[in-house]
Structure formats: C-alpha cells, structure tokens
Image (cartoon, rainbow, N blue to C red):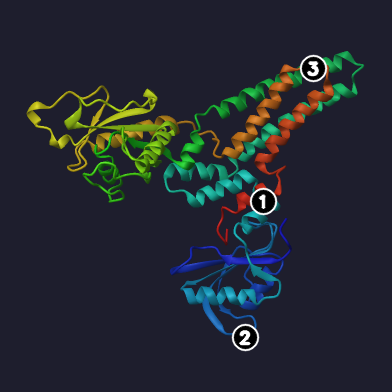
Amino acid sequence: MSDNATIFALSSGQGRAGVAVIRISGPAAGSALDLMAPPRPKPRFAGFRRVKHPQTGEVLDDGLALWFPGPKSETGEDMAELQVHGGRAVVAGVLAAIGAVTGCRLAEPGEFARRAFESGKLDLTGVEGLADLIDAETAAQRRQALRQSGGALGRLYAGWRQRLLESTALIEAAIDFADEADVVSDAVARARAGIGALQGEITRHLDDGHRGELIRDGFQVVLAGPPNVGKSSLLNALARRDVAIVSEEAGTTRDVIEVKLDLEGLPIVVSDTAGIREGAGAVEQEGIRRTLARAQAAELVLWLVDAMALDAPAPQVTLRPDRLLVVVTKYDLLDSKVLQPLPDGAVAVSALTGFGLDRLTRRLTAFAQARMGGDEAPALTQARHRQQLLRCRAALATFLGSPMEEFELRAEDLRRAAQALGRITGAIEPEEVLGEIFGRFCIGK
C-alpha cells in the first residue's frame, strides 16, 4: 500500500522541451498550489499563474496551473498540475520548490499508477494497458493498448469472475438445502450449465493464436540460411539503414541482430542470424545454435537461398512449412536470358537494387495480418494472464468432471477458479506481482 505522502514528479519526457508537465498527488497538493501559484484555479480549469518558490518567493516561471480535487482525479486523490517551460533549469527549479512544501516527496516509478489502482480508478489489466500504450510503436499496438487501458479486458475478466461467484452461490445453496431434492437438482443444473458455457468462452479466449501477445511484443521473423546468402544485406534493406555488418567473409554474423519494423501498423521484429553450415568453429557453432532456436520459435522464417546456387544442397534443418517463406537473394547477379525457375512460392529479391523488396514486404504483411488482424474482441496480452486463465480453466474442468454430490469440494473448485481470475485484475494479488507490474513505469506515471 502507498503511504499518505504527497508525491510529485515530471510527467512529460526528460530533456529540453517546449512545455513540461509536473504532477502532484496527495493531501498537500492543494497547499502546494496555494503556496507556489496562487490563487488556486477552479477545479478542472487551467489558470495562468506566476510560479514562485514557496519559501523564498523567487519567481521560477510563468505557466498554467490546474486543480483536480479528489476523488474525481486520475489517482482518486487531490491532484495538481503545473505546466511550465521545458528547459532543464526551469524544471529542476520547480521540482526543488515542490519538494520544499511540507509533506511532499518525489514519486517512485509507477507510483501515480499504483495510487490509481489502489483507489479503484484502474484494475491491473488497465495499468498494464497504460504501460503498453506508453510503449506503443505501431497503430495496432496503440489500438490494443487503448482498449485494454480503457477497461475492456478488465470488464471481461470481472464479468467471468462474477459468473463464477454466482455459480458458487448456487452450489453453496445446494449445501444449505441438501434435504430438498428439487432445490438441489435445480441449483446443480444451473451451476453446471453456467460453468460449461464459461469454460467454452475461456477456451476460445486462450486459443486465439497468441494474437494479443504478438501485437504487444511483435511478430517475430527470422532470416536464416547458409553463410553469405545476403541475410545481413536484406536486413539492412528492410530496415533502410545499416544495422548489420556486411562482408564477403563467411560467418561474419554470430550474434542475433534485431530490427523493429512497422508494416501497415503491425509490429514486426526481424532477426538476422548466423549462417548455418557444417564444420564451423566453436564460436560460430554457438551462433548457429542460437539461429536454430530462434527459427523454431519464430512466427515466420525467411529461408534465404543464393540465386547463383539454387541447386546447392541445403543444410539439414527441420522447419514448419506453414511458417516458412523461401527468399531467393542476389537476383541482380543472374543473366536475364538464363533465369532459372524459382522454388514454389518463393520471392526473388536484390538488396542491392531493391528488386522484389516491395513484394517481400507485402508477403510479410500478409503473414502478420493473418496472425494478428481481424477480431476486435479484447485479446490476451500478458503471459501472466494466460497462466491464471489456464489455472481457472483447470479448476472448471475439475468441477465439471467430478461427482456433484461432493458439494463442498465442488464449491472449492469454483473458488479456486474465481481466485485465478481475481489475480489477473488485482482483486487478489501478492505484493511482489504488484511491484513487478508498477516497476515497468518511469517516474511520473
């Protein structure tokens, strides 16, 4: 739980800027405004004020002051906001001045969000959505984070939990009225029907192909193939900048190099990996091991083949065919009069001339859209959620597959399922999990 101190921090970005936003939350927020930027403006109205040091009266800046009395504020507490010029000296001076107000201290990372959670303004899924919104780099990530921070996911899980509690009440009614057969029969039938429907909804939610997690973390694409087929050159061409070393010497790439792309609003993470070949040295072999591990876990593997060596034997690597796209590189080196037929479904490219890159990008986008696009329903975004939903579903399966006459045990099954859902939203959550979630935020959020 948070203490009763009044916290403050720079809410906007660090460094020089046109405007800096400084937030204050807690019981002394109003006093800080009265001392530094009087008179206090009307609630939720901006007032132009001269900002002064509360003890010396030194003028620090001219800016806007805003007042949000609790509980109608972001944190549920009294809140104030100062919008001043974003020079480093101005910001440092205003922060030091607020610190001189009795009861005020600098906020810790994520403390504003934590106070919003503790006052019921956000549940944990909303907090995680807010963190994802701050980190969003593509339109798809922004849309998903907005839905989650707006409470769509929290409402879904809270609704499921409420239905579980209602079914638990039915089973407990069967315990209380065990000698009334009609009451018991009706209560058990209603509980089983409700739990069966809920189990199906949770299963469909879990079986979404990790759509939400892919949007949040990025669609993983791995460039793989023998050495010197142009993986690093292709990565540079896709990134439109030099991010990987290009050399004619085989085995140059040993560590995995990642580049984030935004393709029609979808987050794509492309990894350049070590070339796969026999007889490599110990260091290169470690790079090959990492390549194979990445390729097995990737959503899509671009297997690169040199246009000048289409008939060369390929390394013995087992990859899923539905997650494999063959890319023929260095196509500019072929004599246009003796072009060889491409492997089925392959894309020919030249990183040097740009030939085929647009087509390859379209294919990449199509693969990503098939996995991440479509359904606008709230999606799973966190491994933490998935773990608790699996526990919930397991408890429901135990309930449905066990003798209903053991009412106390069946009620306990449903309570365990409800607890799992409560851990997702924060209705039930250990302190260490809260610390990890709020620790994702910077100071001022």
Within 10 Å of the Cα at label 3, are there few (<14), some (14-19), or many (20+) other Cα atoms?
some
First reached walking from the N terminus: tag 3 or tag 1 = 1
In the rendered structure, which amino acid carries the disc numbered 3? Met
In the depicted structure, whether residue 199 falls above or below residue 211: above
Local SS, label 1: helix
Is 148 in front, or is 100? 100
User: Looking at the rendering, which quadrant does residue 190 occupy?
Assistant: top right
Is 309 in front, or is 363? 309
Q: Which residue is mark 1?
A: 117
First reached walking from the N terminus: tag 2 or tag 3 = 2
In the rendered structure, which amino acid carries the disc numbered 1? Phe
* Dot in front, 2 or 3: 3
In the depicted structure, whether residue 88 falls above or below residue 73: below
- Measured in 3D between alpha carbons, the distance from the residue under mark 2 to the one under mark 3, in whole angstroms, is 74 Å
Is 196 in front, or is 332? 332
Q: Quadrant of the N terminus?
A: bottom right
In the depicted structure, whether residue 244 falls above or below residue 109: above
User: Looking at the rendering, which quadrant does residue 177 occupy?
Assistant: top right
Picture coordinates of residue 94, whole percent (x, y): 56, 75
Q: Which residue is mark 3?
A: 404
Query: Residue 56 bears which disc, if any?
Result: 2
Report the residue at 48% width, 63% height from top: 13
Picture coordinates of residue 420, whole percent (x, y): 69, 35
